[in-house]
Amino acid sequence: MTYKIVALYRFTPVADPADLRARLLPEFRRLNICGTLLVASEGVNGTLAGLPGDIDAMLDLLARDVGLDGGEVKFSSSGDKPFHRLKIRLKRELITFKQPSADPAKMCGTYVEPRDWNALIADPETVLIDTRNIYETKIGIFAGARDPGIEKFTDFAAYVREKLDPAKHKKIAMYCTGGIRCEKASAFMRAEGFAEVYHLKGGILKYLEEIPPADSRWQGDCYVFDKRMGVGHGLQAGDYAMCYCCGWPLTADDRKHPHYEPGVSCAHCHGRRSDEDKARFRMRQRQMDGL
């Protein structure tokens, strides 16, 4: 059985997010959709999976209710069910940033198609920035990109204000997994006075889907938020597992570390959780294993 996976977002005013959630939830359940959809007053964002026909029907619902279009959807597939269940959550922001000036509805950067991306980032005047968290950049990054080394997206604002200068860094190119972070990050940088800001349309996922390996400037795999953990060119799954405690992508060697316990801890988070937390995580893992 092959599952169709969609990463999607749509910035659009939603007058009553709770009502939208109440209407979508029974429809998604009827279609046996799994994964997570976030609903906020600024739109929707999520990664979901199901059988191909059911995913197509789900996308039709989102096109009807929030105006979702094909340019805001990235597709991939998996032979295994990538999520355990369906969650539709109400949020204040689709991706938490806590910067009121970062409003993609008012302004954002200039979209760059994957086919034009290599030329842009090859320009010596371009400052290339990865907007993702450090556990994501660990397994893959564009050649020559600056890695802010942030633990969470809200830290990106401080990085911009401390490390970048609109008068000096006049041509900015940024990217993220599927495009949504760059909507807010580019809007923020425009508001901070950066005049020339570009971002990769469709994100890394679209680039890996469209650009052949021989022409690619991508190095490694792209972190994704499902059981595959990482994908490469052609969106083929890599050899990673997730630490369900901290989200860190784990290689085969990481999983041999003495501090790795499935569902409980890895070498990166072993000392950060209490014994009570670990007991709860072990119970969750037993439930996931069906024991």
Image (tube, rainbow, N blue to C red):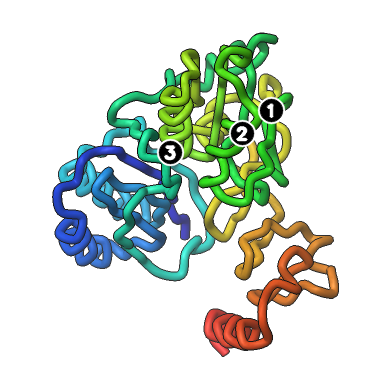
Q: Quadrant of residue 180?
A: top left
Q: Looking at the image, do the residues carrying marks 2 and 1 touch, with CB atoms under 8 Å apart?
A: yes
Relative vertical location of residue 73 with respect to residue 6 in this rendering, above or below: above
Q: Looking at the image, do the residues carrying marks 1 and 3 touch, with CB atoms under 8 Å apart?
A: no
Q: Residue at position x 34%, y 61% from top?
A: 33
Under circle 1, the secondary element is: loop
Relative vertical location of residue 186 with respect to residue 118 in this rendering, above or below: below
> Which callout, 2 or 3, points at the residue further toward the start of the chain?
2
* Residue that label 1 marks: 145
Amino acid bearing label 3: Ile
As drawn, the label of residue 53 is none
Amino acid bearing label 2: Asp
**How much space separates mark 1 and mark 3, taking CA atoms?**
18 Å
* Residue that label 2 marks: 130
Left/right placement of residue 230 relative to residue 5 reads right
* Residue that label 3 marks: 180
Circle 3 residues within 10 Å: few <14, some 14–19, many ≥20: many
Under circle 3, the secondary element is: helix
> Which callout, 1 or 3, points at the residue further toward the start of the chain?
1
x and y percent of residue 43 in the render?
27, 44
> Which callout, 2 or 1, points at the residue further toward the start of the chain?
2
Q: Quadrant of residue 117?
A: top right
x and y percent of residue 213 in the render?
68, 27
Under circle 2, the secondary element is: strand
